[in-house]
Amino acid sequence: MKKFLDLGLQPLANSYLLKKDLNRKEKKFRLSVGFDEKKYLVSILNTVPKEKMFNENYPYKSSESYTMKKEFRKLSEKIKKKFRPNMVLEIGSNDGAFLKNFNKKNIVGVEPCRNLANITKRKGYKTFCEYWDSKLAKIITKDQKIDLIYSANTLSHIENYSEIFKAVDLALTNKGVLVLEDPSLLECLKNGAYDQFYCEHVYVFSAIALQKIIDPFNLEIFDIENTRTHGGSNRYFIKKKNNNFYKVSKNVRNNISKEMKFGLHKFTTYKNFSRKVVKSKIKLNKLFNNLLKKNKNIIGYGATAKSCTVLNYCKIKKGAIKYFYDTTSFKIGKYLPGSKIEIKKYKKLNKEDTDIVYLGAWNFKDEIFKKEKHFIKSGGKFITHIPLPKII
Ligand code: DWN
């Protein structure tokens, strides 16, 4: 693994602080990112034990955005129509934004974070509060194998991907399909989205890397869709190699050649990216300093895990951003790790309260701009670092 990016000392991204803990020293780890020239795989270099991150206090809920709920609904309809699965399983079912589009008899959720698993259990969805592995796969499929396994924004969080694919091979019927969805490395590099790297994102995948890592597990990609979620993601459709039911689509070849053309197989591409990241940090600091000199009142919108990387890497301190608005019950009243900026319950933006808003949830820009059209009409501005730091 060759290191190409150093994002400094970082706290755990989703460990929001309680007021009583503000004076306690936070545990930090060095966030650096490397490239494996054999597997074409990009990953963080110091990983954190999964139990420290994905436990009964996990604050992120997929249902907090209209965009995600709509996307899951659309995908569920497509899956039902195209694959007609009898039994579906979701790895990392979170608060049920995907599950809820299925009949309770036809879907099983796997979610290791107890607070989230309890939400879907309460709604009547069979949910295993466990990490996905071969042992669990055998238990779940004792009587019936799975026709379709779906997992969004989960594989990138799991260091030991081998266990995931072994368990998938065990659980899937021979004609079964695995649908994986994660942020696209190509989009991440194109958008300067260095904040896709934090403790939870062990990997940011490309198609060329995923293809290589699933090969030893009797699996192959037969289609790829590019989606706009989370700043640009890839949805991979994967089958067992001996399943001739599905033909390999030309989308696979097209995506791979796009990635090779961009240079995702070459270390120099990543070195160039890291130079751009340093420039982005300098520019974002300049923007903040200029605004603060003019006594502008800045607040944040969307206390994301990604914001943690940006605020800590760019050393944007409490005071520069007065507070963040967020809609997530698990985050409200707490403080962002590292920067210790308070998170308040979301209120519609108003020019009287703030001049300018840092877009923490830049991946939901369209949804947010639609919601805040009055603020924008009355001259309210946003500050973003994607694709380059600027005021919009
Ligand atoms: O991979 C991961 C992704 C899917 O979710 C996890 N590791 C953790 C988490 O990352 P994130 O926190 O960077 O994700 P989001 O989806 O960008 O978070 C958006 C945040 O913004 C949420 O806290 C909800 C909030 N929000 C809001 O307050 N008002 C979002 C929208 C759209 C809004 O209108």
Image (cartoon, grey):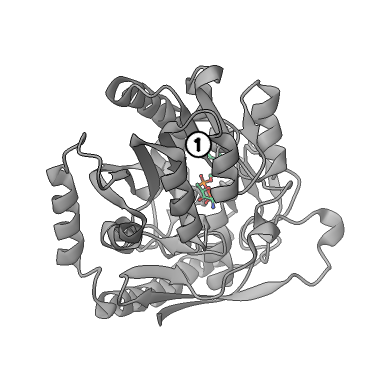
Relative to residue 52, is residue 186 drawn left or right? left
Q: Is mark 1 within 8 Å of ligand 1?
A: no
Residue pushed farthest right?
A: 20
Q: Residue drawn at (24%, 71%), measured in percent from left and top?
A: 265
> Can you give x and y, in whole percent of width and height, for residue 327 in the image?
62, 37
Q: Residue drawn at (46%, 26%), measured in percent from left and top?
A: 87
> Can residue 133 be seen in this snapshot?
no
Q: Is residue 10 above or below residue 377?
A: below
Residue pushed farthest bottom?
A: 2
Looking at the rendering, which quadrant does residue 320 occupy?
bottom right
Residue at label 1? 90
> Can you give x and y, in whole percent of width and height, for residue 310 in the image?
52, 64
Q: Quadrant of ligand 1?
A: top right
Looking at the rendering, which quadrant does residue 23 occupy?
bottom right
Q: Quadrant of the N terminus?
A: bottom left
Q: Secondary structure at mark 1?
A: strand
Looking at the rendering, which quadrant does residue 229 occupy?
top left
Pick the front one: 299 or 167 = 167
> Can you give x and y, in whole percent of width and height, for residue 314 in the image?
53, 71
Relative to residue 7, is residue 240 drawn left or right? left
Q: Residue drawn at (66%, 36%), measured in percent from left and top?
A: 117
